[in-house]
Image (cartoon, helix red, strand yellow):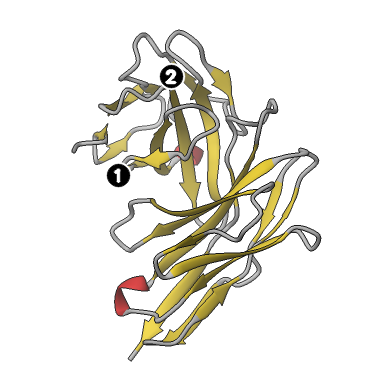
Amino acid sequence: AQKITQTQPGMFVQEKEAVTLDCTYDTSDPSYGLFWYKQPSSGEMIFLIYQGSYDQQNATEGRYSLNFQKARKSANLVISASQLGDSAMYFCAMRGINTGTASKLTFGTGTRLQVTL
Amino acid sequence: IAGITQAPTSQILAAGRRMTLRCTQDMRHNAMYWYRQDLGLGLRLIHYSNTAGTTGKGEVPDGYSVSRANTDDFPLTLASAVPSQTSVYFCASSDSTEDTQYFGPGTRLTVL
């Protein structure tokens, strides 16, 4: 079974500062993918960034980077230079690769980020 | 670019009624999914379809059914709605089961 844990129900960050949102995972799949999604107050789910378990480098996408530490089973999202528009709910998710769980994206419970002036 | 559309946007439904949530994608993605989102529980997979003509059960399939007659459409049916099915429902699709899933705007369903 797969499990995603996000231990920070809420976070505050000042505009222009960097913030790290924590995500730890548990899986028995030999290879897997990790995702981060953003859900603003309007409700849609927006894909941010992806990390494959065998990728040699940490994923980056603009101001988003994923701090992947495989041995610690963590996949933290780092947002640099926070903007007011970054205020949203953030979800970490994972699925297996080349396994029977490939179709099944497992989500964490989310972290609500509030960016302040 | 439309991507994924869901209908209705929101619905209030009496318990015991039948309801079909519609999902259509125009990206020719092979795989489609239905999730429900409940406060404090994140998103949970209800049913999925790897390709047209096939479906599979997710984490919380009871009380729901799906069909995948073609590539574009993936309706979710509640045969006899119950209050515990009050939730926000998201449809998603991906080019294959190995690819990133992209989500529709969601349907907010209230069962009274």
Query: Which mark's residue is nearer the viewer, 2 or 1?
Result: 1
Give the residue at mark 2: B79
> How far across and how far down the image is residue B30, in percent?
42, 21
Q: Secondary structure at mark 1?
A: loop
Q: Which numbered circle lies on residue A102?
A: none
Q: Quadrant of the C terminus of chain B?
A: top left
Indicate the amino acid at tag 2: Ala
Pointer 2 indicates a residue of which chain? B
Camera-nearest residue between A44 and B82:
A44
> How far across and how far down the image is residue B80, in percent?
44, 22
Q: Determine whether B55 is above or below A87 in the image.
A: above
The residue at the far front in this view is A56
The image quadrant of residue B22 is: top left
Q: Which numbered circle lies on residue B105?
A: 1
The image quadrant of residue A68 is: bottom right
The residue at the far left in this view is B1
Q: Residue at x 48, y 19 (%)?
A: B65
Q: Is residue A108 left or right of residue A116?
A: right
Q: Determine whether A24 is above or below A46 in the image.
A: below
> How far across and how far down the image is residue A116, in percent?
37, 87
